[in-house]
Amino acid sequence: MVDIKTLKSKGERGFLDGHFLIAMPGMADANFARAVVYICAHSDQGAMGSSSTSRSR
């Protein structure tokens, strides 16, 4: 298994590295509704990102 640190040291980038994923208005999953996710690392082993979610009151 190749870890993210090894991929980065080889200079390899995943398909979604450095991209933002923005939830569509009709997103059914409440965990991701209105979310913006920045993909830090992406490979065939998995993905890691940072999520920013705004909850309306």
Image: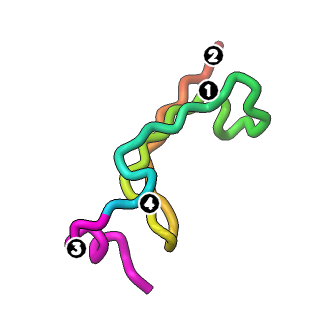
Residue at 55% across / 32% down in the picture? 22
CA separation, marks 3 and 4? 14 Å
Q: Secondary structure at mark 2?
A: loop
Amino acid type indicated by mark 2: Ser
Tag on residue 56? Answer: 2
Amino acid type indicated by mark 3: Lys
CA separation, marks 3 and 1? 35 Å
Magenta stretch?
Answer: 1-12
Tell me where residue 53 sits by quadrant.
top right
Q: Kindly identify which residue carries mark 3.
A: 10
Q: Kindly identify which residue carries mark 1.
A: 34
Amino acid type indicated by mark 1: Arg
Q: Earlier in the sequence, mark 2 or mark 1?
A: 1
Asked if the residue under mark 1 is in contact with the one under mark 2, i.e. CB atoms within 8 Å, the reply is yes
Q: Residue furthest bottom?
A: 1
Please state which of the two labelled residues, at mark 2 or mark 4, is closer to the viewer: 4
Q: Position of residue 12 (x, y in %)?
A: 29, 67
Left or right of 30? Residue 57 is left
Q: Kindly identify which residue carries mark 4.
A: 42
Q: Earlier in the sequence, mark 3 or mark 4?
A: 3
Q: Nearer the viewer, residue 17 or 53?
A: 17
Q: Secondary structure at mark 4?
A: strand
Tell me where residue 2 sits by quadrant.
bottom left
Residue at 65% across / 13% down in the picture? 57
Amino acid type indicated by mark 4: His
Q: Residues within 10 Å of mark 2 (few under 14, many from 20)?
A: few
Q: Position of residue 37 (x, y in %)?
A: 49, 39
